[in-house]
Amino acid sequence: MSLGQSINVQKQVHAHRNSFVPRVFTVTGKTRETVDTVTIKAHSGDGGVQLEVHPGQFNMLYVHGIGEIPVSISAVGSDGALIHTVRRVGPVSKALGSLRIGESFGVRGPYGTHWPLESLHGRSVMVLAGGLGLAPLRPAIHHLLKFRDEFGDVGIYCGARSPADRIFASEFARWQKAKPRTNGAKSNEVRVTVDRVPDHVKAAWQGEIGVVTSLLPRSLPDPGNAAALICGPEVMMRHAVQDLLQLGIAKEHIYLSLERNMKCAVGLCGHCQLSRYFVCRDGPVFSLDRVERLLTVKEL
Amino acid sequence: MTTQTIESLIGSHPFFVGLGAEFTRFVAGCAKNRYAEKGEYLAHEGDEAAALFLVRRGKVSIETNVPGRGGVMVETLGAGDMSGWSWLFPPHKWTFDIKALEGTSFVELNGKCLREKCEGDPRLGYEVAKRLAGMMVERLRSTRLRLLDLYGDHSA
């Protein structure tokens, strides 16, 4: 590394010095979403300024003595509460999920790019979520519905493993009802599909059975004026992209939230490198035209 | 209230859209407009497969009976979907049940009639075969994706 490069890195580190220091947040609410997924509501315990969060960004959450992981922000409370939804699959996420109300954890962030919602004004927007991928999309859905008049038709299409694996299911009806005030012709569509329905709930299940892409409309009245936001397992996103392109949506109007092994969260350590991008800094939200080729490179 | 002809119902359904007026009229000779009540079966596994269904409104399930579990739903289909291709392939038997999950409007095309028309006019036969193949590719892809169990926890 040359002296010039070293100075540049030092400048970046200096610029991000606050980014490396976790703030203490205290758990003020918990909601069990599924058997292994929990939504944690937390408030700042240090009296500091409220974090400015954009839909689609993530935080690094630190559990004392265990470690730190990236977690998407699944909502921001009206009182500034940070809301994260965590699936308990590793030591840190299990520890986060086990925190009780009143216990604290560290928060660095928010980091990364966000869903470009302001630039989508006037467009119809389709939201495709697979599994826990609905978490980073939820703030975008809240925005779409809060500023409903700014957008055309809104379609929210969610896939889950089974009815019991749906997250935020209690909000679906409200999302369906959030009609625009000025143009009643605009539609809201919220549809859910699952891969399988266990026998003990099959009589009660009213949704669909199949892959999430099967929920998409077969054609769009004005594909040139449509956009899509996608988050879920990468295989699901690759297939969703094929269908969205088939519908005629332009690559630059298809946005994906990618997941990689994010560690520093500020584009320095390289753990989340995806070719020329650092997913933590240049993503996690990318437009398809930037990453389409990279999605099919197995080595990445 | 406007009444749609069977030709317009077929011509506007995604499965046959773009087929052309001549073929649509030809195919319409095999079709009738139908409605199934919730719980009614459109097809039973093992019976002669004598129809292609174009779902217009409502929802049907593809299911099979599993001893001790009853009917197990494999997939649901709704407005704009089609179901039923066994009429084209010997032994012309349904391989799954098709059941209406709610009141469902659909166009039923007689499979034997359609098969004879396809064999009598290879251009029509090729058009129908292409559309069926496209639908099969879509269903196969969906099935493969579901086999991957993408939303499961595979970290262990």
Image: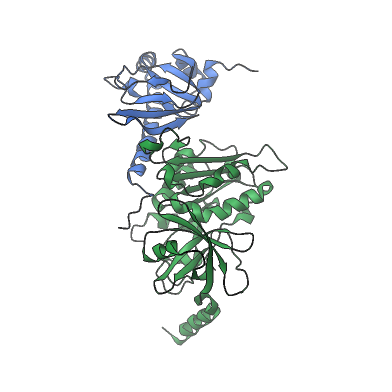
Which quadrant of the figure has residue A262?
bottom left
As drawn, A36 above or below A209: below
Q: State the residue at coordinates (58%, 75%).
A: A46
Q: Residue furthest right?
A: A182
Q: Is residue A148 visible?
A: yes
Q: Residue furthest bottom?
A: A3
Chain A drawn in what color? green
The image quadrant where one finds the C terminus of chain B is bottom left
Q: State the residue at coordinates (61%, 55%).
A: A117
Colour blue belongs to chain:
B
Image position of A171 (left or right of A133): right
As drawn, A271 above or below A194: below
Q: Nearer the viewer, residue B85 or A131?
A: A131
Place of residue B149 in the rendered image (x, y in percent of width and height, measured from the top left): 35, 47
The image quadrant where one finds the N terminus of chain B is top right
Place of residue A277 in the rendered image (x, y in percent of width and height, measured from the top left): 45, 66
Place of residue B47 in the rendered image (x, y in percent of width and height, measured from the top left): 31, 18
As drawn, A88 above or below B26: below
Q: Is residue B134 visible?
A: no
